[in-house]
Image (cartoon, rainbow, N blue to C red):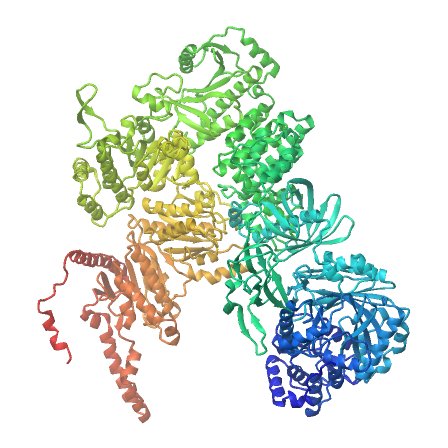
């Protein structure tokens, strides 16, 4: 006997329905749908009764009915919950109603309210949710009556549902009517005791089923009593959560069940479906067509189904339903399960097999069109003529993880098509599968005439179906469709659970899958890298980031059973070489199609493999066809060795899907919940989580110690609450979230075990991982390594496709061990071609990314532009840049740049170019090694020489030298001929080009017309002839010189004169025991008819070079020597000059370069030039040589033993010369102008007697330092020389005293001090005394470098605690005081700055002194360096072995760190630099050459050296820190503008600069300007500095320092802004004195001109052209730096004023320009909004003044903008101590609300503060009028001291104007009189008032009587004289003010009386 259910209420209205609640829900829905119209919709007339149907469901069934209803012309309504918003399934609905939270689909009141609100006349429930809820159907009926609307429920009647809707009721009905049943229990509501009893009755195994619902939810198999209680708990939870009903029952479990069901429609059994493929008792695959049953069973099922349809009332118009049966496959018996009173999910298989449309039938039936349903034809096809159809349900779940749900976003969805495939999907790409609902995504249905055909189509459809973003069961379905048991049809419900291979991941083709998965990860990494790299479009950031980024494509992959280790080498854009477990699997190609590498084609092992990859949080799902073409899904968890946290995932349990926490399982050993720290076994249940109403038990992946549990097992954090029904509301979990960690011993594999294969195999790819970089690695026999593979590896590194951290070291090892000598001829040719390729690419990459362009065109800025405009269609870089990029793309096999569109491959190629540049910079030594090793294979083609010369050019341009020596060796070995490298300067003079062409054919043909063979014969014959050694009948002077030289060479060996092809060139052959040498004397004699120039010398040297080169060809010698001798004229020689007609450093080097680089090749011992300079009788010998690849020059001194003909060397100078240095006497003679030098001796320091320890006698002691004064370039200078010949140049007491004296002397005489360093630091023997002197030296350095006022300087000296310092200064003052400059207290030195000159060693404390200097110059020679700690000390402490030059030579100090400002390549250049410093800072003779019109470069180019040279008055530009590597993007250096020294600085391009060296250079440049007293000119475009990649501390500090230095800069500072955007640059916005904005040119875009118009009001000046701009700059700096000039012509023109006070006039033209000296007015802020005020600079009698004047023109009156302009200009004048000339003529401040809202009060207050607190003389003049507060503000005489106040006598000075005053005082009276009509009295009052007002308000009355005015003047013509007098008066007043300030600057100012407290008593209130 089966127990019956509890009775339900008679009607739903009695139970639940509440009309007020329905109305309340309708109101809520209106709020949720605010856009809905209240107007009732008029629907079109149609045949049926359905007008509008609300679909109370979601997903694919809802979409199916939307489409079907539309076909029938019926409107549809979708209800959509909040989680479903923005999904696609409801897009086909005609109307949408949003209903709120996720559970509203099951809320009957909500659905009813939605139906009422939408005016629907029918509701279709679909399946699930409310589809089988009889209460809902009854409530619809009730609502229809109440609201008088007939709302049709498109399903069974409520009464039928009551009978069979619940499983227990249906079982009872079946039992009563003889329909077979399986054994079971009655309803159980939760009492454990009853449940146990009922279970015992039914017997185990049993099935627990929920009374409500379907879809297998809540079904649990229980095999014994121990499993019963947990299974009941889970079932009840799901029942309450899903259906609000936890009632369940038991049913006997059939061991081999097969699920069949019958589709009914009303009373007709339509067809049978087999639904035996199930998981969790929910169907997965259904079939229809072939029945799999015998005829008897088939008829029994059909008749039983129709019987229950009749007895339940289903035949009475209930439409579609399903009767479900269970077949016991062992016995053949079947039993009734349940009846589903709805259309089932699997209905499409019945549709397809019978050719019907059940969804349409449902609509037709309820539309009262049942006659259109073809029942008869269906009944006929039930037994024959059926197709076979299969349906696979596509679930968002992981069948290999216990079917755990996988909600999430569908990132990709591709549905199969063609031939018998149907896809019923409710989702598309971008939709989300929600955890709130069923996990079904859709249904895939295939149909065939046979089952075999349907199966074939299903396998194809599943293979074509692709879903990414969520885990699905597609791969399990594929395995199932291919499974033999399924294909046989003899399967039952346990096919999935009994066949383990169907619930395990794929193992077929796993090795190939691992390779493809690794490739996929590799593609993913590179695609991400590409996307990230192009995100910011910032080239500097990109280059910077790539320097520290490497790509190690090494992975560890784990399948379910195996571990694979892979390593990929990217050999090209589309190619990889791959290792799997150490074995080389060859080349694999890839072409990417989707974003981020989720879809691509693989070329591998002769196959093209389409691959799709879905990256899940816990694994990678790889989809690809195997060798047989069958689609495979493989899963791998993947660990990249490139990851920062390389931690094993083995013991980590992650959430397999997005879900919620349910409970922590019990530890089976303690029966309590798991706790952290407990030991857990593999497979133990640990957590239960839930998603989509399904619970999943998670087990531990490994055994070990439970080290972490979700939220540490804290239930308070895991459980958010519990519902009234007992359902747990758990913490939300994201997919992939770590839930638990189990610590286990890591399984380690020996690296060597895996790599044994590598070592033995010999493949370069297999060897690679084994190469150790830190230990000596023993290679396998490397001759087995393929040369081809080595080239591929090298090429991939050079092209940047391969970039690993240790690649440089490993490649170095490979090259060292590879045996190149054993290669074949064909291999040699391949290596030669390879050499050409890498050489050209190297040059190409460096040209593209070089950021130090010098003065030539740089592609760097254009590449930045190309990067930022990459996606702009139509963008084309400049032709040269485009060509470079296209050439670069060619190396990667990519199409050239096109303006139409860029391809992804071009993006790839660009990023690899960046990586290639990073590789080249990192592996400079490797590149050098590679070039040298492979140079032997290089063919003798000009392109190689061109490329090598290109490297030399780039090395020079970028101040690099890593490759220079190597390249020069290669070029020498190739017999190099110079090549003109594009982008470099051609150094050969035009005059020699033709000769050079002849020279290349035959060197002697360029000097003689005779045939080469004749010349060769004469030359060879001369070896056997005895030619006269000394030439005869030749210039006596030259003959004498040659004779003397030959006397020397005769002492060296056997010398013989040879035939020479040119007259005046005497060739000799010297043979010694060790070597053979050619010596050539090339002579130049003066010609009376022609003036001899440097080009004559150049030609003579060129002919000599040709003769030597030809001699070397005819007969080779070891060396050759060229000496050029001059006679008969004196050369204008001044190495430091900058004049073209003078033989100076620059033009000498240019000439020598032409000879040496183009005509003289090979090993020459020396090239010298002898001549006699003007103003001396001493011959000068110049010597030329190469060092570090650079041409150098030296002067050969007669006593320098390094040169031949040495006349003897003083022993004390010998060591100095041998080290390549000059004694200080040489420096003195070469640096100072001839006959301008005197030594400065210091009393008490020089001439002291000391006992000589060797002789015991007293001798005059000469300190190790000397001071010389003289002129350098015609300007005075003082030089302090350290003498390394005395105590090694160490600083002792006397040397320190001399330095103090030198510093004091320089300050007092106001001249530059050059400190020549060549010696050690402090003298150790003298101990503390030497340190004391050093400290005082630092003290003096700081006083000089900061340019102190005289009062401060003297106070500092006299306050010093060391008497020695004071004594030295005092003695110096006594001896030289008469020569010193006179200083007033406030005066500062104008020309006293310090320059540290490093010509030798500088160690210890000396280096700090050098760093204090205003400028630092360092000679680039081995013995010239600056080190704090010497090499010997470093070696003893750290063990590092370096030379002092390597520690602190010019390459470090100048190039690497930018410490020194100028690097001299040789001594002569050092002299030239010092002359340029003198010329730049002290002034020079202006060049007389007329300047050509400068061609302005492209808009992107902001500043270059050419611009500064062109506009500099001196004609040259002295660059600062030019050698500092990486700083070339910032131009910085000295020019002369406005007869003053200006440090000009700015980025080269509009994009600004980008490197840390540039920031440091900018900061140091400002300090240099401050220390040298130079003005500052900043030139920039839209940006100054791009900081996107430099935000670390290293850059932040110098950037802050830069801003601080700029803001504190005391000199004149002008910002020349070439782009209006530059006015916004935050780093510069507050630092300028003035801004000059350049107007866009005619070619500029309209937007640029508009931007200029908007921004020009914020600029101080604007200019239409660059030339005009520099004129303004010149004028500005001249006015600021030359405050008083002589002979300044006075202004012209008569000064006039309008008679009437109300008449306006132009103040600027009528007054300002006329009172100032002629053409000296420079207006400030012409476009400023404060147009009521004129501001600017000018001169009065040569004196610079600042002008502030009212502008009456146009009715201008002082207002808020004008007052702001007033304040800013006054601040500027005060900063620079410029007297102000204030001219007032204004009717007072403009009144009104506009001004009040413009903050006139605050602005006026701020301006008054500035006026009062300024400390400059002011002359304030009132012309016609000034009133009230404006009269005070405009520098009233009583505003502050220092103001001289004057006015025209007749000017009006009053509180307010007459009219306003009359209205105020007489207004009321006049109003009364006017009402009375007494006009006469009004006129009388007015006359009397205005006569009185006019008299009293005159300046010479009230104002004068108060004493505020210093005077009045009667005529405007007197104005110039008044101004002159006023300036004198203001100066006097200011001096009195300052005296009083000084008077009270010390001590107490106010003394407080003793009885202070008593004085205040009376003021205290009680």
Q: Who is closer to the viewer here, 200 or 1688?
A: 200
Q: Quadrant of the image for the N terminus?
A: bottom right
Q: Is residue 182 left or right of residue 1259?
A: right
Outermost residue toward the bottom? 1876
- Residue 939's x, y, as percent? 64, 28
Q: Quadrant of the image for the C terminus?
A: bottom left
- Residue 651's x, y, as percent? 57, 54
Q: Quadrant of residue 1841?
A: bottom left
Q: Quadrant of residue 1173?
A: top left
The residue shown at (41%, 65%) is 1729
- Residue 963's x, y, as percent? 52, 33
Q: Who is closer to the viewer here, 873 or 1363?
A: 1363
- Residue 440's x, y, as percent? 70, 67
Up/down of 766 relative to 1924, above or below: above
Q: Is residue 201 visible?
A: yes
Up/down of 1290 relative to 1853, above or below: above
Q: Is residue 1827 visible?
A: no
Q: Who is closer to the viewer here, 34 or 1916?
A: 34
Up/down of 363 relative to 510, above or below: below
Q: Is residue 131 left or right of residue 1637?
A: right
Q: Is residue 1497 left or right of residue 1892?
A: right
């Amino acid at each position: 006997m089966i127990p019956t259910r509890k009775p339900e209420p008679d009607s739903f209205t009695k139970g639940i329905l509440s009309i007020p609640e329905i109305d309340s829900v309708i109101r809520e829905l209106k709020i949720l749908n605010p856009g809905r119209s209240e107007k009732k919709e008029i629907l079109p007339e149609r045949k049926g009764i359905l007008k509008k149907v609300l679909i109370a469901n979601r997903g694919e069934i809802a979409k199916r009915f939307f489409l079907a209803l539309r076909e029938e012309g019926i409107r549809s309504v979708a209800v959509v919950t909040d989680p479903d918003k923005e999904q696609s399934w409801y897009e086909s609905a005609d109307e949408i109603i949003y209903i709120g939270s996720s559970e509203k689909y099951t809320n009957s009141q909500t659905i009813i309210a939605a139906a009422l609100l939408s005016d629907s006349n029918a509701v279709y429930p679909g399946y699930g949710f409310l589809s089988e809820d009889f209460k809902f159907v009854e409530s619809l009926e009730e609502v229809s009556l109440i609201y008088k609307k007939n709302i049709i429920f498109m399903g069974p009647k409520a009464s039928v549902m009551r009978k069979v809707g619940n499983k227990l009721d249906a079982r009872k009905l079946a039992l009563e009517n003889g329909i077979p049943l399986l054994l079971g229990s009655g309803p159980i509501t939760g009492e454990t005791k009853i449940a146990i009893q009922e279970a015992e009755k039914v017997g185990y195994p049993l099935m627990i089923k929920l009374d409500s619902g379907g879809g297998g939810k809540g079904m649990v198999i229980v095999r014994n009593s121990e499993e019963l209680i947990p299974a009941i708990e889970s079932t009840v939870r799901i029942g309450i959560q899903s259906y609000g009903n936890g009632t369940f029952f038991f049913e006997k479990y059939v061991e081999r069940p097969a699920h069949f069901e019958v589709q009914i429609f009303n009373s007709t059994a339509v067809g049978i479906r087999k639904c035996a493929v199930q998981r969790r008792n929910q169907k997965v695959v259904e079939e229809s067509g072939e029945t799999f049953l015998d005829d008897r069973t088939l008829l029994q099922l059909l008749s039983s189904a129709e019987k229950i349809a009749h007895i339940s009332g289903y035949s009475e118009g209930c439409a579609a339903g399903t009767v479900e049966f269970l077949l016991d496959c062992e016995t053949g018996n079947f039993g009734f399960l349940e009846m589903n009173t709805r259309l089932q999910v699997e209905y499409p298989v019945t549709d397809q097999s019978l050719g019907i449309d059940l969804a349409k039938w449902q609509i037709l039936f309820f539309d009262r069109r049942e006659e259109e349903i073809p029942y008869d034809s269906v009944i006929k096809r039930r037994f024959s003529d059926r197709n076979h159809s299969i349906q696979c349900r596509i679930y968002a779940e992981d069948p290999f993880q216990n079917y755990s749900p996988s909600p999430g976003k569908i990132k990709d969805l591709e549905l199969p098509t063609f031939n018998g495939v149907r896809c019923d999907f409710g989702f598309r790409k971008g939709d989300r599968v929600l955890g709130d609902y069923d996990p079904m995504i859709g249904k895939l249905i295939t149909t065939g005439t046979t089952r075999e055909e349907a199966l074939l189509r299903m396998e194809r459809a599943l293979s074509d179906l692709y879903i990414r973003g969520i885990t699905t069961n597609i791969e399990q379905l594929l395995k199932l469709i291919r499974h033999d048991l399924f294909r046989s049809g003899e399967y039952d419900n346990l096919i999935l659970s009994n066949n383990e291979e169907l619930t395990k991941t794929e193992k077929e083709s796993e090795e190939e899958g691992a390779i493809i998965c690794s490739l996929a990860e590799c593609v993913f990494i590179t695609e991400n890298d590409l996307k990230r790299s192009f995100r910011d479009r910032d080239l500097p950031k990109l280059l910077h980031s790539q320097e520290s980024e490497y790509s190690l494509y090494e992975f560890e992959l784990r399948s379910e059973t195996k571990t694979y280790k892979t390593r990929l080498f990217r050999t090209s854009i589309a190619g990889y070489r791959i290792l799997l477990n150490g074995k080389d699997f060859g080349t694999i190609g890839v072409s990417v199609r989707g974003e981020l590498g989720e879809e691509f084609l693989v070329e591998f092992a002769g196959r093209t493999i389409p691959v799709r990859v879905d990256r899940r949080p816990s694994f990678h799902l790889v989809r690809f066809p195997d060798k047989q073409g069958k689609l495979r899904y493989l899963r791998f968890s993947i660990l990249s060795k490139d990851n920062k946290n390389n931690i094993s995932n083995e013991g980590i349990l992650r959430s397999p899907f997005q879900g919620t926490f349910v409970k922590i399982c019990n530890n089976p050993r303690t029966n309590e919940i798991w706790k952290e720290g407990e030991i857990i076994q593999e497979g133990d249940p640990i957590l239960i989580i839930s998603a989509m109403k399904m619970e999943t038990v998670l087990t531990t992946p490994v055994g070990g110690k439970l080290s972490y549990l979700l939220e540490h097992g804290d239930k308070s954090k895991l459980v958010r609450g519990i519902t009234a029904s007992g359902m747990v509301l758990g913490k939300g979990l994201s997919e992939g979230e770590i839930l638990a960690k189990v610590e286990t011993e890591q399984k380690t594999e020996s690296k060597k075990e895996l790599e044994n294969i590598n070592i033995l195999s010999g493949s370069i790819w297999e060897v690679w991982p084994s190469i150790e970089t830190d230990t000596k690695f023993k290679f396998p026999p490397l001759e087995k390594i393929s040369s081809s593979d080595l080239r591929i590896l090298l090429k991939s590194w050079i092209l940047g496709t391969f970039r690993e951290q240790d690649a440089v070291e490993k490649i170095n090892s490979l090259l060292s061990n590879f045996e190149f000598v054993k290669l074949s001829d064909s291999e040699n040719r391949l290596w030669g071609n390879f050499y050409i390729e890498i050489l050209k690419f190297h040059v190409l990459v460096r040209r593209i990314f070089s950021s130090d362009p010098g003065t030539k065109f740089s592609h760097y800025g254009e590449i930045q532009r190309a990067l930022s405009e990459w996606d702009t269609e139509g963008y084309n870089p400049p032709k040269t840049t485009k060509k470079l990029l296209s050439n670069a793309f060619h190396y990667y096999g990519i199409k050239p740049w096109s303006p139409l569109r860029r391809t992804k491959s071009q993006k790839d190629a660009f990023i690899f170019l960046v990586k290639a540049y990073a590789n080249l910079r990192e592996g400079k030594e490797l590149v050098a090694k590679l070039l040298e090793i492979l140079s032997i294979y290089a063919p003798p083609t000009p392109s190689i020489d061109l490329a090598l010369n290109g490297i030399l050019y780039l090395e020079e341009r970028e101040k690099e030298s890593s490759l220079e020596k190597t390249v020069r060796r290669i070029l020498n070995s190739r017999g190099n001929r110079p090549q003109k490298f594009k982008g470099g300067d051609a150094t050969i003079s035009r005059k020699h080009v033709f000769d050079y062409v002849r020279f290349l054919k035959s060197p002697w043909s360029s000097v003689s017309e005779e045939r080469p063979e004749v010349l060769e014969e004469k030359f060879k014959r001369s070896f056997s002839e005895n030619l006269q050694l000394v030439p005869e009948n030749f210039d006596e002077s030259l003959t004498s010189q040659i004779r003397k030289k030959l006397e020397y060479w005769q002492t060296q060996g056997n010398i013989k004169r040879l035939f020479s092809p040119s007259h005046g060139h005497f060739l000799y052959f010297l043979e010694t025991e060790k070597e053979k040498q050619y010596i050539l004397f090339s002579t130049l004699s003066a010609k009376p008819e022609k003036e001899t120039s440097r080009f004559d010398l150049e030609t003579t040297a060129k002919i000599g070079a040709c003769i030597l080169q030809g001699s070397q060809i005819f007969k080779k010698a070891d060396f050759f020597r060229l000496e050029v001798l001059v006679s008969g004229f004196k050369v204008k020689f001044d190495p430091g000059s900058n004049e073209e007609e003078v033989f100076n450093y620059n033009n000498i080097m240019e000439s020598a370069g032409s000879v040496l680089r183009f005509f003289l090749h090979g090993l020459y011992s020396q090239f010298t030039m002898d001549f006699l300079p003007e103003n001396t009788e001493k011959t000068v010998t110049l010597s030329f040589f190469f060092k570090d690849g650079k041409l150098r020059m030296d002067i050969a001194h007669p006593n320098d033993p390094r040169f031949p003909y040495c006349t003897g060397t003083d022993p004390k100078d010998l060591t100095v010369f041998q080290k390549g240095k000059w004694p200080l006497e040489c420096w003195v003679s070469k640096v100072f102008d001839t006959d301008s030098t005197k030594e400065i001796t210091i009393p008490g320091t020089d001439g002291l007697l000391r006992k000589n320890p060797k002789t015991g006698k007293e001798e005059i002691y000469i300190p190790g330092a000397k001071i010389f004064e003289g002129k350098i370039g015609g300007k005075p200078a003082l030089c302090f020389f350290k003498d390394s010949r005395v105590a090694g140049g160490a600083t002792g007491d006397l040397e320190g005293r001399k330095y103090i004296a030198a510093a004091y002397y320089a300050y007092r005489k106001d001249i530059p001090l050059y400190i020549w360093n060549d010696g050690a630091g402090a003298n150790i023997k003298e101990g503390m005394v030497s340190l004391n002197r050093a400290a005082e030296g630092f003290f003096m350095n700081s006083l000089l470098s900061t340019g102190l006022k005289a009062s401060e300087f003297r106070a500092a000296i006299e306050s010093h605690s060391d008497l020695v310092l004071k004594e030295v200064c005092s003695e110096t003052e006594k001896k030289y005081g008469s020569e010193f400059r006179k200083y007033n207290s406030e005066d500062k030195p104008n020309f006293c700055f310090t320059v540290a000159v490093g010509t030798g060693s500088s160690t210890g404390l000396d280096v700090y002194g050098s760093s204090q200097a205003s400028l630092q110059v360092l000679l680039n020679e081995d013995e010239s360096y600056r080190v704090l700690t010497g090499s010997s000390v470093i070696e003893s402490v750290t063990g590092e072995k370096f030379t002092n030059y390597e520690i602190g030579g010019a390459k470090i100090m100048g190039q690497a760190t930018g410490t020194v400002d100028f690097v001299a390549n040789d001594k002569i250049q050092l002299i030239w630099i010092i002359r340029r410093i003198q010329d730049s800072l002290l002034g020079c003779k202006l060049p007389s050459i007329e300047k050509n019109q400068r061609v302005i470069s492209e808009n992107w180019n902001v500043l270059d050296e050419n611009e500064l040279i062109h506009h500099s008055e001196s004609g040259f530009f002295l660059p600062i820190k030019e050698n500092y590597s990486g700083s070339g993007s910032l131009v910085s250096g000295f020019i002369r503008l406005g007869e003053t020294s200006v440090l000009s600085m700015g980025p080269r391009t509009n994009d600004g600069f980008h490197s840390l060296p540039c920031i440091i250079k900018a900061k140091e440049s400002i300090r240099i300007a401050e220390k040298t007293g130079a003005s500052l000119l900043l030139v920039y475009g839209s940006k100054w500095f791009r900081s996107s990649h430099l935000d670390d501390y290293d850059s932040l500090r110098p950037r802050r320092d830069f801003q601080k230095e700029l803001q504190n800069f005391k000199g004149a500072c002008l910002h020349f802004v070439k782009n209006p955007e530059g006015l916004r640059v935050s780093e510069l916005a507050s630092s300028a004195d003035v801004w000059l904005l350049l107007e866009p040119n005619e070619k500029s875009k309209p937007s640029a001109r508009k931007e200029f118009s908007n921004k020009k009001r914020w600029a101080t000046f604007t200019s239409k052209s660059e030339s005009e701009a520099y004129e303004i700059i010149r004028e500005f700096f001249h006015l600021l730096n030359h405050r008083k000039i002589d002979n300044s012509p006075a202004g012209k023109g008569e000064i006039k004023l309008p008679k009437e006070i109300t008449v306006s006039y132009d103040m600027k033209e009528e007054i300002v320009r006329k009172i100032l000296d002629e053409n000296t007015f420079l207006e400030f802020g012409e476009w400023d909004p404060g147009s009521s005020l004129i501001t600017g600079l000018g001169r009065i009698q040569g004196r610079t003044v600042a002008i502030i004047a009212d502008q009456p023109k146009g009715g201008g009156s002082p207002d808020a903008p004008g007052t702001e302009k007033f304040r800013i200009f006054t601040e500027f004048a005060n900063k620079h101590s410029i007297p102000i000339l204030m001219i007032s003529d204004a009717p007072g401040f403009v009144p009104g609300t506009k001004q009040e809202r413009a903050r006139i009060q605050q602005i006026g207050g701020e301006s008054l503060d500035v006026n009062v607190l300024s400390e400059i003389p002011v002359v304030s003049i009132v012309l016609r009028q000034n009133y009230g507060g404006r009269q005070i503000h405009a520098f009233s005489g009583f505003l502050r001291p220092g103001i001289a106040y004057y006015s025209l006598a007749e000017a009006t000075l009053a509180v307010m104007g007459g009219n306003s005053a009359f209205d105020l005082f007489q207004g009321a009276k006049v109003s009364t009189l006017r009402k009375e009509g007494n006009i006469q009295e009004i006129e009388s009052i007015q006359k009397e008032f205005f006569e009185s007002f006019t008299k009293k308000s005159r300046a010479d009355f009230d104002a004068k009587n108060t004493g505020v005015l210093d005077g009045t003047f009667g005529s405007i013509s007197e104005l110039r004289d008044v101004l002159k007098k006023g300036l004198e008066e203001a100066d006097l007043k200011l001096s009195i003010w300052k005296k009083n300030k000084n008077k009270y600057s010390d001590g107490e100012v106010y003394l407080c009386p003793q009885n202070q407290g008593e004085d205040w008593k009376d003021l205290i209130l009680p």
